[in-house]
Image (cartoon, rainbow, N blue to C red):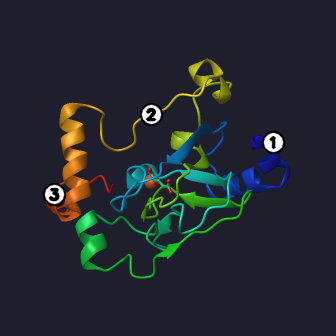
Amino acid sequence: MYDILSASGIIDLIKQIEPKATRLPNVGCNYNLPGSTTQHYHTDYDFSRGFMIANVAVVDTIIANGAMEAAPGTHKKYLPYWRFVTEHAGRNSLRVEMKQGDVMVRTSSMWHRGMPNMTQVARPMLAMTWEDGGSQLSDPWMKEGGAIKFFPNWFRPTTVGRIRERITVAAPIIYSSYRFASSLFGNKGK
Ligand SMILES: O=C(O)CCC(=O)C(=O)O
Ligand SMILES: [Fe+2]
């Protein structure tokens, strides 16, 4: 996949937009499971350390299997969550549907959220990411010895993490309120 992105000029495009993306990317996948629920709006990293992302649709990605919702333009200035909410920065948000093989090039600083997968089949989406310039490994594909490894996403698979996740799914407003309040004091922009 990297070779294809390279041959089609997409890696060059990413380096042109973000010259700090000098190394090979970290390689991962967003695996949207059946029965998932709407994620909270977020950015993927601290604003001051924003990095480039190439998401490749490995299957057709539509509303039904959880095409991401993105808020265009929200990467341009640092927005704590409370500002994102009070400035209605997500008002022009759109669902990014992709055909198999489509590539979405974005910055980690653009606000977005994963959406419910209402189908019976998991929806993978490849993610090549250039955190702090790219992977520290000479061969990023040999991470975990080249094996596939599943990682939890936002909530930890511990008792406390599971309780937090259940509360968020049942009453998202509780988690949003917590994030709104903590963003008044923090300065990370996630
Ligand atoms: O899987 C997706 O569509 C997006 C998920 C996402 O934004 C995340 O986990 O950070
Ligand atoms: Fe994300």
**Badge 3 is on which residue?**
178
The amino acid marked with disc number 3 is Tyr
The amino acid marked with disc number 1 is Asp
Q: Residues within 10 Å of mark 1 (few under 14, many from 20)?
A: few
User: Where 2 sits versus 79, above or below?
Assistant: above
Lower position in the chain sequence, tag 2 or tag 1: 1
**107 and 29: which is toward the camera:** 29
| Residue at the top extreme, as displayed | 145
Q: Disc number at residue 151?
A: 2
Q: Where is residue 103 shown, x and y percent of the image? A: 69, 59
Calculate the distance from the C-alpha at mark 2 to the C-alpha at mark 3. 24 Å
Label 3: element kind:
helix
The reply to whether the residue tagged 3 has its Cβ within 8 angstroms of ligand 1 is: no
The amino acid marked with disc number 2 is Phe
Question: Which residue corresponds to the image point at 83% horizontal and 55% vertical from the top-left?
Answer: 8
The reply to whether the residue tagged 1 has its Cβ within 8 angstroms of ligand 1 is: no
Q: Is residue 82 left or right of residue 102?
A: left
